[in-house]
């Protein structure tokens, strides 16, 4: 009976917490990677616009 109580009240909550933590971190990492890619793409567009403006001003 003691082992069942330990499994139910100690081990299960810890395992659930670790599983939830891993899932949450993966989800946040995906969101961060997506945001980073979006910002890098926007930066590339802005750099191209800046270069094209400098070429037209330089002529």
Image (tube, rainbow, N blue to C red):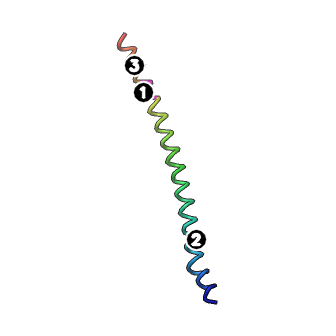
Task: Tell me, for residue 53, which label it has, or none.
Answer: 3
Note whether 12 is above or below 37 in the view shown.
below
Circle 2 sits in a helix, a strand or a loop, which is it?
Answer: helix
- Please tell me which of labels 3 and 1 falls first in the chain: 1
**Residue found at x 58% / y 83%:** 6
Residue 25 placement (x, y as % from top left): 52, 57
Circle 3 sits in a helix, a strand or a loop, which is it?
Answer: helix
**Label 2 to label 1: alpha-carbon separation:** 48 Å
Note whether 10 is above or below 26 in the view shown.
below
Give the class, few, some or many, for how many residues have Cα within 10 Å of label 2's Cα (few <14, many ≥20): few
Residue 40 covered by magenta stretch: no
**Label 3 to label 1: alpha-carbon separation:** 10 Å
Mostly what secondary structure, the magenta segment?
helix
**Residue found at x 62% / y 85%:** 3
Residue 27 placement (x, y as % from top left): 55, 54
Circle 1 sits in a helix, a strand or a loop, which is it?
Answer: helix
Disc 3 to disc 2: CB gap under 8 Å: no
Give the class, few, some or many, for how many residues have Cα within 10 Å of label 3's Cα (few <14, many ≥20): few
**Residue 53, quarter of the rendered image:** top left
Viewer-side label of 3, 1 = 1
- Left/right placement of residue 33 relative to residue 1 reads left
Q: Which residue is mark 1?
A: 47
The magenta-colored residue range is 45-49
Residue 46 placement (x, y as % from top left): 43, 29
**Residue found at x 47% / y 36%:** 40
Note whether 48 is above or below 19 in the view shown.
above
Residue 41 placement (x, y as % from top left): 49, 34
- Please tell me which of labels 2 and 1 falls first in the chain: 2
Q: Which residue is mark 2?
A: 15
Q: In this figure, what is the number of numbered marks? A: 3
């Amino acid at each position: 009976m003691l082992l069942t109580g330990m499994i139910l009240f100690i081990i299960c909550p810890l395992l659930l917490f670790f599983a939830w933590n891993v899932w949450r971190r993966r989800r946040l990492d995906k969101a961060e990677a997506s945001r980073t890619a979006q910002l890098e793409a926007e930066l590339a567009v802005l750099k191209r616009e800046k270069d094209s403006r400098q070429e037209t001003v330089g002529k």
